[in-house]
Every structure is written in structure tokens, then in C-alpha cells.
Amino acid sequence: MEVCINKKDWDKIINYARCASEEWGTEIGGMAVTVQQENGDWQIMDPVIMKQDVSAALCVLDKTELAKYYSKMAIKYKKKEIRFCWWHSHAKMDAFWSGTDTNTIDEYEDGDLSFALVVNVKEEYKCRVSVWKPWVMHEDVELNFLDKEDGYNIPASITKEVKSKCTQPKSTWYNSGSHYNPKQTNISFIKNSSKLATAKDHLITQAWIELIDKVDEINGQFISGEYEYDRYKKKLDDINRRLQNAKMPLHVNIISQGSFEDILHVSASDIIECDSGYEHLNPYDNIEDVMSYNKSFGIGGYYG
Ligand SMILES: [Zn+2]
């Protein structure tokens, strides 16, 4: 028979212990249910604290509170086979069974089976299984720590540190996953609406240039035999999906299977089409314009 606990419940107990230790330098205690699993093992779950008098020497749970707790849990876990686990912390002291502790454990002798757990802020512990019937037997066991199966919470401090130390990946139409709404372009300083339209045009032209580059690369890999047509088509389908997600008025016209000759003779820009009304943004028609755009926006850009 094993006794297990999942990481979330364990962390909760340890955090209660840390909190009492930091606030008052005392121990703290509470209860948890122990639920029998299908394989016969017992899992310590749902640790709580209740009204108590915390002192450096011992913590005594309020008897009335305890009675309320037992009936509440009996209802909550009525479909499960449960027992109870009395847990407490020794703050910064070693985790061991004191005389007071074993006396507290003995208060469970009316039942057939009970559990007790003593921890400290260093996450050391002793876990005791007490069998009361048919004869009394105590055994300290190793806890089996279960992985976090039911999701996890990243502490805010970790999130904060990661965010402060890592640069976010730059969002482009290619990796945006949805409508591309760049926040970091130089659009914000442009006040009047005609220039806003110009900024949007600029964005499309930039995407068009990147697109030619990507399609060129994929065509090249296909021609050199790096992969079969199926994979070639999948790659271009993926690009078309990304363009659509980013609401770019651009599209790759995929050459059909068996037209290998055609691929040899066309350039990437030949198979890129735009919605009508955007033809003037084709970077191939007017490379000079693109370069001057980039300059006017202070962006090095593709040719920079
Ligand atoms: Zn103790």
C-alpha cells in the first residue's frame, strides 16, 4: 500500500507552513482527506486549515471546527472510500514525531485506519500510516509524489522574471496566427488618414517581399529534390492559410502535380497573386518605390 499526494496539494501544505513560519515563527496544522484509489493506494487530498491556536510548541485544532469538517467531508466525498490525515508543520525544526504528536495520532484510535503528516519549511516530512484494527500498527512511509496531471499554475514571480528577461518573438503576418495587427510599426506617428492608408500599403508590400523570399526557398527545396510534391503543396497551403489568417490580400497559386517543368521556369513572384485593387503594391513592379518607402519609414527593410 502506497501513500501518494499530488504536487498541488503538497505545495499547499508547504505554503501554509511557510506562511505561519514567516508570519509568527510558529507551526500550523490542519486536515486533509485520504482517498483510496482503485489500485488500493491512498492519496492525501484537499488539505485545509481550520480555526486554531498556533503557538511555537504545538497547534491544537478546535474540536468544534473539527467535527464540522468531518461531516462536511463525509458529504463531499460520499462516493469515495475516505479516511483522514492530520497534518502539521514544525516550521523550521526537523520533521519528527514528538510526544505531543503521537498523543494526537492516538486520538484516531476509534477508527480502523488513519494518516498523519508532519512537514517543515524545507519540505522534509514524515508520513505515518496508523492501522487500529484488528491490532495497532504504525508505519512511517515514503510519500509518492504524483506529477501535476490536472494542469498547473505558474507562479507570478516566474512569469514576471521570464517576461523581464526574454524578448518577445516579433509578430509578423507569418506567425501571427490571426489577423495581423502590428503594434510596433511606425504607424502611430502618422496622424492623417491618407497616410494611414499608405502605412497599410507599406505593410502589404513588406509582406509581399517576404512572401517571395519564402516561396522562392520552398520552390528551390522542391526542385533540388529535398521533398516530394505532397510536402511541397502542404508547405504552400500552410503559407496561404497564414496569409488568410493575417488578412493579407495575397495568395500563392500552387502549380499542380506533374508540372515540374513549369516550376523550373517560373519564379516565385510569378505564382503570387493579389486581390484586385492591390496590384500597385507588387514590389517587383517597383523596387525603387519600396526602397524609398523603407527610407521614409526609417526601416532598413528587405533591401536595407
Ligand atoms: Zn509536531
Image (cartoon, rainbow, N blue to C red):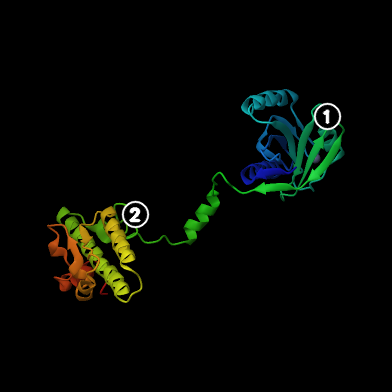
Answer yes or no: is residue 82 visible.
yes
Residue 79 horizontal side relative to residue 209, left or right: right
Rounded to the nearest angstrom, the CA distance separating label 1 from label 2 is 61 Å
Q: Earlier in the sequence, mark 1 or mark 2?
A: 1
Nearer to me, 131 or 24: 131
Badge 1 crowding class, 10 Å Cα cut-off, few under 14, some 14 to 19, many 20 or more, is: some
* Element marked by disc 2: loop
What amino acid is labelled 1 in the image?
Glu
- Quarter of the picture containing the C terminus is bottom left
Residue shown at 71% from the left, 34% from the top: 30
* Image location of residue 162, percent across then percent down: 50, 57
Q: Quadrant of residue 246?
A: bottom left
Question: Within the image, what quadrant is residue 50 found in?
Answer: top right
Q: Amino acid at mark 2?
A: Gly
Estimate the x, y position of residue 197 in percent, counting from the top left. Answer: 17, 56
User: Residue lying farthest front?
Assistant: 258
Residue 118's spot in the image, x, y percent?
76, 42
Count of numbered badges drawn on the protein: 2
Residue 262 versus residue 186 in the image, above or below: below
What residue did someone put label 1 on? 109
Disc 2 target residue: 177
Q: Is residue 172 left or right of residue 149?
A: left
Whether residue 300 is visible to the viewer of this picture, yes or no, is: no
Q: Position of residue 128 (x, y in %)?
A: 79, 41
Q: How would you rate the neighbour count of disc 2 (Cα within 10 Å): few for under 14, some for 14-19, many for 20 or more?
A: some
